[in-house]
Image (cartoon, coloured by chain):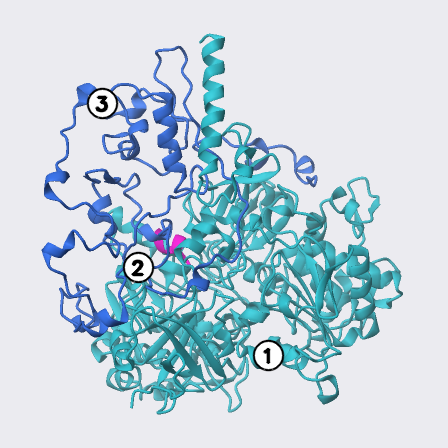
Amino acid sequence: MGLRQTSAQVRATQPISLVAPYAHGEQTAEAQEVRTAGRYSEQRRSKDGPNAGWENHVRNLAKPAMNYGSLTNVTEAERTAALAERAARRAYDGAPPVVPHPISQASAAACLACHGEGVVVKDKVASKISHPPYSNCTQCHVPASGTGIPTIESPLLRPVAGNEFVGLDAPLKGSRAWPQAPPTIPHSTQMRSDCLSCHGPQGLFGLRTPHPERQACVQCHAPGAELDQRQFFPAFTAFGSSPSELSIARQ
Amino acid sequence: MNMHRRQFVKLSALAAASAVAGIRAGASTPAHSAAVPGADGVKWDKAPCRFCGTGCHVRVGVKDGRVVGIQGDQLAEVNKGLLCVKGYHVGLALYGKDRLTKPLLRRNGKLEPISWEEALDVFARRVMADPDRFAFYGSGQWTIPEGYAAQKLMKGGLSNNHIEPNARLCMASAVTGYISTYGVDEPAGCYDDLDKCDVLILWGNNMAEMHPVLFSRVIDRRTKGQQVTIIDIGTRRTRSTEHCQHFLEFRPHSDLAIANGIAHLLLKNNTYDARFVERFCNFRKNTATPTLNGEPMTFDDYKKELELYTPEHVEKISGVPAEKIRLLGELFGRRDLRITSVWCMGFNQHSRGTDINRLVHGVHLLSGHWGRPGDAPTSLTGQPSACGTAREVGTMCHFLPGGRMVANPEHRAESEAIWNLPAGRINPKPGHHTVKLWEKFCTPTDQGGDITTVFVQVTNPGQTLPNLHKLFKAKRGLADKFLIVSDVYPTATTELADLVLPAAMWVEKNGMFGNSERRTQQWFKMVNPPGDARDDCWMTIALARRLFDLGHPGMKDKHGKFLFTIKNNAGQEVPVWDWSHYYDVNVDEALFEEYRKFSTYKHKNLAPYTEYVKARGLRWPVVEQPDGTWRETKFRFSEFDDPFVKKGSEIQFYHSVTKDDKALIWFAPYVKAAEEPDMEFPFWLCTGRVLEHWHSGTMTMRIPQLNGAMPHAYVEMHPEDAAAAGFANGETIVVRTRRGELALPVWVNGRSRPPRGSLFIPFFDQRLLVNDITLGDPDPISFEPDYKKCAATVGKLGVAKTLGKS
């Protein structure tokens, strides 16, 4: 479960009871085996496990208050940087991003603890879920770096072979009818209902809206019918070309 | 907008795109980064997903001859725009670095590139030399036209019935379950049941990982405020269990007793649906030697047989508390609920697979939870066209297309008529089923091994057969055995191949699949295959043409014409065996239109090819309406939806085994598994799949996002068992069975939680072949092996002594 245990650590650890893991109490608490917690004084120096690199000095955690007034249109460079960061976790634009941290393998329930409303702790952002009706998180989002099995079998971790797929890139901008017009939405909004997940104050800097106080996004920003699959190539709709044209094999 | 600004935007877009692509997850080298300059110019087209049997439709984005993106298809009723992580990354399956691009022939132990001409020549001469000892082994990943061509070549051309799909290892018991219950194969219900049911029962089925899109279809109803009770009847806790109100953890193989326990309670409490049973059901049991159709029994005998299965007795066998059995009995006894049961490999890969399939159909029939939307017993399939190709085209050793049987003279005559063959061309004797076929191939010819050449398409038996040492690896060193493998990547099977043929895959070719809910789907070729890779269907036709040229008489119909004579719209014959002309005409359409003639016999009517071009799949029977449109059928045998049901009959099983429009409720007793844990081998060993990898991992192990999430196989065990054996989490241990041993990392408190005395190993990892040690005890009726149960022990790596529980 993401706990990078060594044999020595496991031997030194007695199974202890936590909260019963399942509401209807099917499984005994002994089934849950965890590491003994270290002392608080040691925590800053302990750089192992999923929290390696985690900044937990209280003084550094203070979050600057959101100053709506200071937000302005982002620059091309900032937008590019944000898109690059976004792309690093996606095979192509529109692919579900991989999870950049270890997860609970057994259940998706823990995901929403942070991603339900979104959390910002210093420079770490757990973005808010953009599609709350879908609750089986791990169906689409898988961890980027392994199961968390603390295996040392390095040959097994080597990929079988490389892959030469090159994914579609994110569109840079929507179109504007005139320079000051609200831009259209340049990407699919399929199944996503919360724009502020990416464009809100917790979003990547280059993608943030300069006016998060306005909540009705599509009042001004038009989604694209083709991007959202509301328009289809004639050949693939029920109202398409004649059957003889359709049946011609295509090279 | 002035020109300067426009240009600036365009240039920055290009620069940004290159920068982005350079660090994209999964992009192999920056050299490819400039290949896709932006979103414009991407052409989107529809296709069913390449992976499982759910049959989601995806939209495939193609630019400059390459797949660049995937979207869930919102027009698709199956998935309504949603996919799973495999589906979202299916486009990457085409671009693994080690795609096979040239035919390879083994010379002096080494695979060396040869031309297609040479390859076909070697192949055809090998078959020509001994056509009766040739076998064709495919899968539920054959497209419908591919399977149909293979079927016609073997049974219609070579008079040879040694053709099998790997589906024998996958859903053969579901087939025998359906046929022996309803007289005809495949589910009567469909995925719409998942939207309507009040109770969903997962029988040994980890739907959250194996059919995630369908699972979400159910659990997302809860986010919409609907109530649905989900019950997991399983042998270990899985991700699915997390979403269930009830978890019934049972001792492997005792599902037989649980199903009987439900029937017992329905009878004892008098809550069975007497009207339904009276009108629509007869009773059956197995003969001493189990057969497909067994022998009749009376309702009273049926009751008597079930008397034994009290909740307390079932508890003793299964370990499931009696009150949970009562819970199931009460639910099935309620008329006001709609109950859907789903299952997959837990039932089918079961040495009493046919029986457990029958029993659950029986529970639904007995309780009348049958035939209304939301009331259905439904098997799910694991391959994209297990139903469409293996079951409907009938690419099995005993089937002819459209639900016909090799052993039936009328069926042979009908098939010969459609294929325009001389009477008697089709061999009346069924061929070898999968396990026997490989056993014969791995047996020296002079010791009765009567299969000498096998052609494998679209599957990986070197990894997926059970007990691999016996059924596959024993081929090594048998000089007169010749293995021909068509695949897209090197696999455990190509390792032993003598001839390797590079194949086109998925949207590199035209295709049609048939999913778990009788939905036939179509797609067009969108990109070219790499190098010299070619379509599997072409390989079959090209082989047939070589045999024709070499003078094999079976390659001609009764008028002397080549078996695969295909004409274009102008009526001219197209030499489709010549690769340069293969796409001059739509071969898929030609083959499908011929195959369609077979579909009406079992009322599995298919629409013309062009209807499927327009649709995101159609569920058969698809029947033409007076206005010329084609209507699909969601609920078979139910009067309100199935056009073949006689008006006023409510439900009519019109292919009834007993010829009286009634289905059969079967009794089958609980019996022990073939190999159960003992002192020497104290653990149950179960195998299966994981969310990220599809079957043997040939495609998904080459997709960085999927491989990254699940890089290797493991053995899951209970923490107390691990502690008792002194294993640390992640330590490499040895799992041993009577057939061999396997060293792999142990995962404690991982994704799933097996109970004490139970192990689980996924089979996707070619480097850690669990099938080296599985037993594969076959079901006596379907001949499908059991991969879910055998006895094992565990030990420290490098320690000779086995560590049992004693």
Disc 2 marks a residue whose amino acid type is Gln
Nearer-the-camera pick, A249 or B12: B12
- Mark 2 → mark 1, Cα distance in angstroms: 35 Å
Judging from the image, what secondary structure is the residue with disc 3 in?
Answer: loop
Q: Residue at x 26, y 65 (%)?
A: A5
Q: Principal SS element in the magenta part?
A: helix
**Residue at the location (53% across, 83% down)?**
B780
The amino acid at mark 1 is: Leu
Q: Position of residue B147 (x, y in %)?
A: 66, 60
Q: Residue B471, labelled with which disc?
A: 1
Give the residue type at disc 3. Arg
Chain A tint in image:
blue
Name the foreground residue: A25 vs B80.
A25
The mark that comes first in sequence, 2 or 3, is: 2
Task: Determine which residue is flagged by label 3.
Answer: A214
Q: Could you say which disc has been placed on residue A135 in the image?
A: none
Q: Chain of mark 3?
A: A
Say whether marks 2 and 3 touch (CB < 8 Å): no
Label 1 residue SS = helix
Q: Which residues are magenta?
A: B211-217
